[in-house]
Amino acid sequence: MNSSEFETLRPRIYNYLGFHKMGRSPETDALVADCVAELEKTARFRYIYTVEETVPGFLKKPPYSEFLEGASGVMISAMTLGIEVDKKINRLFHTDVSRGAAMDASASAYLEYLSDKKERELGAKGPRFCPGYGGSSVGDLKFIFEILHTEKIGITLNESDFMLPSKSMAGIIALGKEGRLSCRGCFMAGSCEFLKEGKTCFDQVKK
Amino acid sequence: MLRPGEKIAVFDGGFGSELERLGLGGIPEELNITAPEAIKSIHRSYSCADVITANTFGLNPIKYKGKYSLRELALAAVENARAAEKPVFFDVGPTGAMMEPIGSLSFEDAYEAYKQVALSSKDIADGYILETFSDLYEIKAAILAFKENTDLPVFATMTFDASGRTLTGTSPEIAALTLSGLGADVLGVNCSLGPRELIPTVKRLLDSTDRPVIVQPNRGIPVLENGRTVYKLSTEEFDESVGQMVEMGVSIIGGCCGTTPEFIKKISRFSGQPVRPHEYIPHTAVCSSDAYLCIDGVKICGERLNPTGKKALKEALVAENLDYLVDEAIKQQDAGADLLDVNAGLPQIDEKALMPKIVKKIQEYCDLPLQIDSSDSAAVEAAVRVYNGIPLINSVNGEPEVMEKIFPIAKKYGAVVLGLAMDRSGVPRTPAGRVKIAKRIISEAEKYGIPKEKIMIDTLVVTASAEQELVGVTLEALAEVSKMGIKTALGVSNVSFGLPNRPLINRTFLSMAMERGLNMPILNPLDGEMTGAVRAYELLRGIDEGAGRFIEIYKDFTPSATAASVKTKGDGAQAKNLYECVKSGLKGRAKDLTEEELKTRPPLEVVNEVLIKALDEVGALYEQGKLFLPQLISSAEAAKEAFSVITAHMPKDSASKGRVVLATVTGDVHDIGKNIVKVVIGSYGWEVIDLGKDVPPERVVEAVKKYSPLAVGLSALMTTTVAGMEKTISALREAGCEAKIFVGGAVLNQETADRIGADYYTKDALSMAKKLDEVFNK
């Protein structure tokens, strides 16, 4: 990863660490740079996707229907950094908790970064909407899992709708229109630090 | 009649694509009952194959939750498959759930699920084909379930990606070693990639096993066209690559995703041909799920997880403080150990119950292979059973009764066994006497079907101070055994008991033994002189080609530097005193500076005047947004190190503010927040009992009864697991729990905490530490 790519990633990592209010620190910059370098070696990024012109049944209800309104199709995708990253984070929490916390945040941001990049390569331009956002149910993940057969890239869903490995994502992108995310109905809305400052989480992570 | 390894047999091809072609949707296994004629027609279309696979891939009680019983579906599936009038193998796929430790499916539950599959099909099928597994632990559970509950052949295949590993990191060598060891009749690879791309993986499998190998590739690498997955490889191309694999020595061929009856018909030309011989060079090897260790050259076995003479480890074992063992394991790995001895032999411990817990816990964090060390054969079996991979068993000796107990376990689980060159008459005083016992052990093992590469021999070190003349006997016997092609081991540091300057004697003896053919010294890897001697030997003997490893380890060496091979984090050079050290989060210096501080003032004063003040200042900066989370945690870790020193100087009851039980609730496998809380409240002097993640309510209740904590902290990350938190709180209340219940996690807030009946909600680790102090007036 070159330095300009890292500069795209760094603010996202700071967000996950809860530093959005703060200035930068050289120590933390160095720590997260180190974490990202390690992730580049450790992660086995995998993805699986499909492009559907006809919207599958589970997306025909709000808020998905609003998100997809006017779209020519939908890209449904799932991506993961693989189980090795979970193992690394677990081990760090045994040997060096502060580095573990930094690695966890870095891995979340790194997954988003690689996912965004891959989606653009695949021709999707708009924002990603994932079950659990905007009042939708994380329970809808199971439909994505059924459609994509995510087990082929090693992602499973547990009984509480947790994706495993934990650094995995599954979501949809509207094709042929400019999509827009919204905080309406987000489960974090009541306690969101960004909203209190009149900002949104997704605006912070745009380059 | 199938004769794997002698005549080439052909399995059938893709089933899902055929269902799609016929327009059959829904749960594939239910189609056995709802659309039997269509299923039969697919099976008939594959009658060119020698073996038909029943339509049962997803049929296990974890994955299948439909309206039919396993037995109903198994009967229908096998009956449908019989329409092709060929032997029918029951198709067994993964459960679809993630196994422990990353996921929550336990080894025991996976075993039970496959046992139910075995019991529902063993009287109707002709064999089992385990397919598309990527988790070594899951396929181990499955093989054991079918081997223990049926007499039918078990073929076991895994799926590898282009990097040559399964999704969970298992290499072909590890798969071959483990599946062969567990007694799979045939092993191999399915799905994954196309036949051409699979050739390197197949070569590695063939090189690593003497078992027949099966390959069922996809129809090439799929491409996406208009959002649809399309396979484009032609039957000719498929046939050509499969033909190459046949020439390499593959015994059984077939197809997976995208292949159709045309493909199987094409490759059926190989059916009945003699299997080409493939070269397999036997070698002594052990593995975990993602680390393979061939015992050649010199491999270091870490001895620090054996409680003999180690007070802190004894206490940790008695208290079941497995985190301590994990720390020891990681330290040894970082110091250069290649595998680790694990022993829990203390009179007050139920080894059979504890050893499996230890094995699972260490394997969660450390990927080194383990040596299961116990004189209790029941404990050995319990540990080896749940071990993920192929372990070493320590040990047998020349006594028939000992071998009778251990060899069946080693055979069943494929373990390597360490044999001690002694028997009831003691340790022979001549090299010939010890070699004779070694030969007895090897020949007795053969009777159980255990080949000699699965046996290692320890020619036993005696104490030079007591029997100086026997040191040479040990080494001569070692050289003899080595010449027999058997790998050797020695507990080297025993040689110096009772003598001054033990490190010098140990190091010299180690070098003498390595030169005589010692393959596995059992030693303390944290002793840099000992690991250094091994590294130097590897360099001088040309094992470390180009001296790369030696130079990497010692590039910064100066004669004045200490030889310790373990580096601690943070040099702490800037920290002048403990206060600065904690504030700056310099864990590496915390212990020394605490000792210094304790020379000038009493322990309690150090806590109140130094640690708490430093932590309060750090906490205030964090709350003001002037300090970052990793720095807060570093300070907490430094303070925790300091507390561990201070505790030793205080009366037992006054050392801790009280106990707190922490758990991430049932269904929730994300425990990073809880782990941060653990460090931070620990740094404030609270004794934390950490129950881990995905903890069922009854285990929290049980822990509260056992430890009588002042508080219980529950964490949940997602809305779906808040229900689990509520259940846990109800269970605690019903059980009469008097501890205050704290809740936290991303989706929690005061309102939710009130609704589910918690006593306190705290938004982060620091708030919880402060609230605990406030509530309990500490």
Image (spheres, coloured by chain):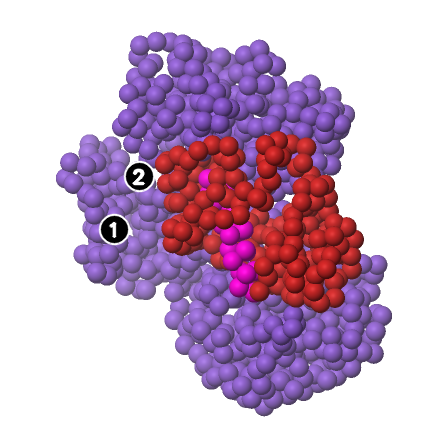
Label 1 resides on the chain identified as B
Label placed on residue B552: 1
Dominant secondary-structure state across the stretch colored magenta: helix
Question: In this picture, is B607 found above or below B358?
Answer: above
Horizontal and vertical percent for residue A180? 65, 50
* Residue B492: in magenta span: no
The residue carrying pointer 2 sits among few (fewer than 14), some (14 to 19) or many (20 or more) residues within 10 Å by Cα, namely some
Mark whose residue sits in front, 1 or 2: 1
The secondary element bearing badge 2 is classed as loop
Q: Are marks 1 and 2 on the same chain?
A: yes
Of B749 and B126, nearer the camera is B749
Determine the residue positioned at 48% across, 63% down: B165
Question: In this picture, is B427 found above or below B321?
Answer: below
Label placed on residue B237: none
Label 2 resides on the chain identified as B
Say whether residue B122 is left or right of residue B384.
right
- Is residue B662 something one can see in this rendering? yes
Q: Colour of chain A?
A: red
Q: Colour of chain B?
A: purple
Determine the residue positioned at 62% across, 85% down: B263
Q: CA distance from mark 1 to mark 2?
A: 14 Å
Disc 2 marks a residue whose amino acid type is Val
The secondary element bearing badge 1 is classed as helix
Q: Which residue is mark 2?
A: B566
Say whether residue B184 is left or right of residue B428.
right
Horizontal and vertical percent for residue B527? 28, 39
Of B767 and B452, nearer the camera is B767
Horizontal and vertical percent for residue A110? 49, 50
Q: Magenta span covers which residues? A: A102-122
- Is residue B409 something one can see in this rendering? no
